[in-house]
Image (cartoon, rainbow, N blue to C red):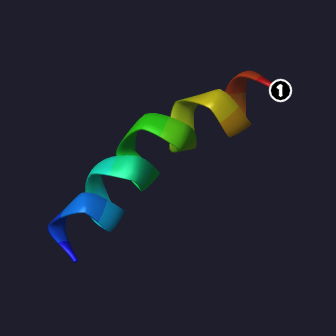
């Protein structure tokens, strides 16, 4: 579960940048 949260934390800014 922790890995999933980490993934979102890294992909979140990527989505905002797009």
Give whichever of 15, 2 is nearer the camera.
2
Residue under the point 37% across and 45% down: 9
Residue under the point 55% across and 31% down: 13
Q: Residues within 10 Å of mark 1 (few under 14, many from 20)?
A: few
Location of residue 4 in the rendering, given as x and y in whole percent from the top left corner: 34, 65
**Residue extending farthest top:** 17
Along the horizontal axis of the image, is 13 left or right of 17?
left
Residue under the point 42% across and 36% down: 10
Along the horizontal axis of the image, is 12 left or right of 4?
right
Is 8 placed above or below 2 here? above
Is 14 placed above or below 6 here? above
Location of residue 3 in the rendering, given as x and y in whole percent from the top left corner: 24, 60
Is 1 placed above or below 2 here? below
Callout 1: helix, strand or loop? loop
Please give the residue where the numbered disc 1 appears in the rendered image.
18
**Residue extending farthest right:** 18
Residue under the point 54% across and 40% down: 11
**Residue extending farthest left:** 2
């Amino acid at each position: 579960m922790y890995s999933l949260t980490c993934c979102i934390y890294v992909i979140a800014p990527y989505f905002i940048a797009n």
